[in-house]
Amino acid sequence: MGSTSEPYNIISGTSMATPHVSGVAALIKSTHPTWSPAAIKSAILTTTDIVDSTGGPILDHLYRKASAYDTGSGHVNPTRAADPGLVFDLSITNYAGYICWLLGDHGLATIVHNSSLNCAMLPKVKNTQLNYPMITVPVTSTPFTVNRTVTNVGPSKSTYTAKVDAPKSMVVHVFPEKLTFSKLGEKKTFSLTVSSHLVGKEEFVEGSLRWVSEKHVVRSPIVAYAGAWLECSVDPIQGNGKKSEKFWDDIAALYNSTTPSNRKRDRNQLKQEWQRTKKRLCAFHGQWIAVNGVYHSGFSTVDLETMALEKYESNYGHSFQHYLVDGIYPEWAA
């Protein structure tokens, strides 16, 4: 450790998380050599521990209850990951359809390098509909539905019952509520519909869906986030190829559908606010790049974020988080 007055030091971050999770993935692959990378990832994500070693909630670096954005799906449990019961699998076609929605033909050609695939022949898959075990949807006062397909990798004959854990502000419906399998490798599709009573009041609301059988518990975190820009386009500047007026009309419609009546805005007001926000984001991104260029292994993402925030405040004379979280424009907090 070198010369220091401290008796010990603790360093955390991706430097240690990456080899640990890679080792777990290798163990699962050795047990299930035919499984795809997506199936292995699903097995790890859906079998995690969501409490700490004392049985209490997982805490963040400030000793507050950690959110899904801090913990992901939870602490990896290698034993359970080797026998997950169900997996959310993804094929090359699924990923290609997502790339088509996200980036179009040019992106598909750049990433996939398969001349036999083109976006005209593929169904476009939105980010919310990608068959991923973690479920992220926009917060809306009207129900928002996603579909997921699970593959049975447990006992050939088994029945799973849906159990939803969610705050009162989040309404979640699952259909069907039971999945019955008769053979190994069988696939079943279910739909999950989410709405929230706290539209415009919180950044996000979280809960979870558990599929429970006699032997297995398959858990998917659910996060409902607030963000008109995020839902209308993957690129708020380019507008996903839409004409400017159409793009900002779509943003205004979604923003106003998730915002109390006394805080509704038209497209010009939202566009002006985005221009202000974009400048702050670009300025913070510059500080983030600067910090990452100096500090590498041994520093966690939280450490780097803290240093970037301090650097931003030192250079610009105000807090970046004050703008985005506390808000110097409180009427925009939605």
Image (cartoon, grey):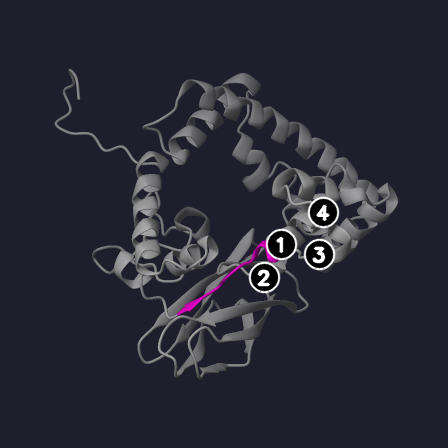
Three-letter code, disc 2: Leu
Q: What residue did someone put label 4 on?
A: 233
Three-letter code, disc 3: Lys
- Give the answer, above or below, for where 84 lies relative to 202: below
Three-letter code, disc 4: Ser
Q: What residue did someone put label 1 on?
A: 127
**The one of 63 and 72 positioned closer to us in this rendering:** 72
Callout in the foreground (4, 1): 1
- Give the answer, above or below, for where 174 lies relative to 270: below
Give SS at disc 1: helix
Q: CA distance from mark 2 to mark 1?
A: 23 Å
Q: Is residue 90 magenta?
A: yes
Q: What residue did someone put label 3 on?
A: 124
Q: Quadrant of residue 149?
A: bottom right
Q: What residue did someone put label 2 on?
A: 198
Q: CA distance from mark 4 to mark 1?
A: 11 Å
Give coordinates of residue 289: x percent, y percent: 52, 23
Q: Is residue 263 visible?
A: yes
What range of the chain is rendered magenta? 86-94
